[in-house]
Amino acid sequence: MTQLTPNEALLDAALPHVAFDGWSQATFDAAIRDSGVAPVVAHGLFPRGGVDLALAYHARGDATMVERIAAADLAGLRFREKITQAVRWRIEAAGNRDLVRRGATLFALPRWAVDGARAIWGTADAIWTALGDTSEDINWYTKRATLSGVYSATVLFWLGDDSPDNAATWAFLDRRIEDVMRFEKTKAALRDNKLASALIAGPNRLLSGIRRPPVRRGYPGQEGTR
C-alpha cells in the first residue's frame, strides 16, 4: 500500500468535513487532527488553511483529467469533440457536488475571487496543453479565456442538474462548444476578408508583442511548487 504524502493525507482527511464546514479553518483543523500530520507541517504546506485545501482539491481534479486524456485514444475525434470530452472528464473528476458547491461559494467571496479565477484559468490551460495546443501570442490567451467561460458555465449548470446521468449538463456543454465554434468561424471569415483584415491589422500588430507566460504547475501543498 502506497503511503500518502502529508499534503495528500491532509486533503483526504479534509473532504468528509467540507460538506458540513466548507473549505474553512474548522475543516483545516479537523484535517490536521484526523490525518495525524504535525500542525507545523500542515501550516507550511497550506499556509492559508481551507482556501489552499480547496485549491489543492481543484488541482487534483485537473491532474485526474490530464491523466485520463493522456491514456485515451482521441485520434479519431474532431478537435471540438476532444475539447468537449476533456471538459466532461474534468467535471466527472470533480465528483462530489457538495465539495464543488462549497468551493464555488468560497471563491465567490471578493477576498478569494482572484484565486478562483486563476484556478479556472489553470483548468483551461491544462486542457489545451494536454490536447497539444502550441499557440502563441494573443491566441494563447483567447483560447483559454473562452474555454474558462465554457467550463465555468457548465460547472454551474451541473451543480443544479438532476437529470439521469447528467444528460442535461452534457447537452448544455455541447451548446456552449457550438457557440465557441461559431465564434471561431467568424474570426476565420474576418481573417479571409480583405477589408476586415485591413481594419484589424493595427490591433493585431499591437497584440503581437504579447507572449504567453511560463506555465506554473502544482498547487498549495504540492512538493516543488513553493
Image (cartoon, grey):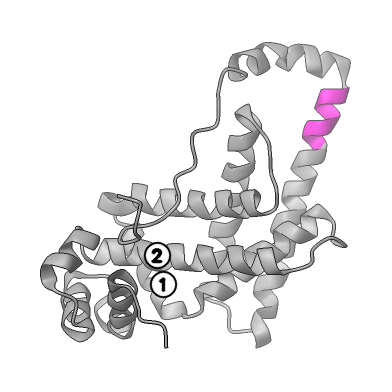
Q: 73 above or below 9?
A: above
First to last magenta residue range: 186-192
Crowdedness near tag 1: few (<14), some (14–19) or many (≥20) residues, C-alpha within 10 Å: some
- Tell me where residue 180 appears, x and y as whole percent: 72, 48
Q: Residue at x 24, y 67 (%)?
A: 50
Q: 200 above or below 155?
A: above
Residue 221, by quadrant, is bottom left
Tell me the CA gap for discs 1 and 2: 5 Å
Q: Residue at x 18, y 60 (%)?
A: 44
Q: Main secondary structure of the magenta part?
A: helix
- Tell me where residue 33 appears, x and y as whole percent: 16, 83
- Amino acid on which disc 1 is placed: Arg
Badge 1 vs badge 2, beta-carbon distance below 8 Å: yes
Which quarter of the figure is the N terminus placed in?
bottom left
- Tell me where residue 222 appears, x and y as whole percent: 35, 60
Q: Residue at x 21, y 64 (%)?
A: 49
Residue at label 1?
A: 101
Q: Is residue 16 magenta?
A: no
Say the numbered circle drawn on residue 104.
2
In this rendered view, identify the residue nearer to me: 101 or 121. 121
- Amino acid on which disc 2 is placed: Ala
- Tell me where residue 89 appears, x and y as whole percent: 63, 70
Q: How many marks?
A: 2
Q: Is residue 190 magenta?
A: yes
Residue 34, by quadrant, is bottom left
Mark 1 residue element: helix
